[in-house]
Amino acid sequence: MSKFNTSLVKEVKEEEAFNSKQSKLKEKYNVSDKDVIVVEKNNFIKFFVKTLGSIIRILIWIVFLALACVGIISLVYPVPRKEVVNVFYEALMQLKIFFNIS
């Protein structure tokens, strides 16, 4: 037989989790009354903003990885490498003209 009743241990853990969550919520919303239970509800706008942010973050990573692959491919093969060097050289010349550097 176990030393402690598992249902009692489970109840105590749930109560501790509830109390810690309540203390965090009370601190977040500046509630100092002990008799108040703070209930935080999810709203549509909050959910939409978080979801949209996650989607945008994933899309940015996909674009970043695609550009990195294009850059690696352009450095590995000789013909694209020569074109990339020409583009950088032309950009440097344009910057020199723009800033009047000899």
Image: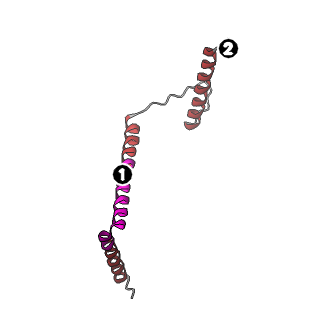
Left or right: 25 as drawn, with respect to 59: right
Q: Nearer the viewer, mark 2 or mark 1?
A: 2
Q: Relative to 54, does residue 26 appear above or below in the rendering?
A: above
Residue in the picture at 58% in, 22% down: 14
Q: Where is residue 65 drawn, in percent x and y? A: 38, 55
Q: Relative to 75, does residue 101 appear above or below in the rendering?
A: below
- Give amino acid for label 2: Ser
- Give amino acid for label 1: Ile
Magenta-tinted stretch: 57-83
Q: Quadrant of residue 95?
A: bottom left
Q: Which residue is mark 1?
A: 62
Left or right: 46 as drawn, with respect to 1: left
Q: Which residue is mark 2?
A: 2
Q: Where is residue 25 drawn, in percent x and y? A: 55, 33
Q: Where is residue 73 drawn, in percent x and y? A: 34, 63
Q: Quadrant of the C terminus?
A: bottom left
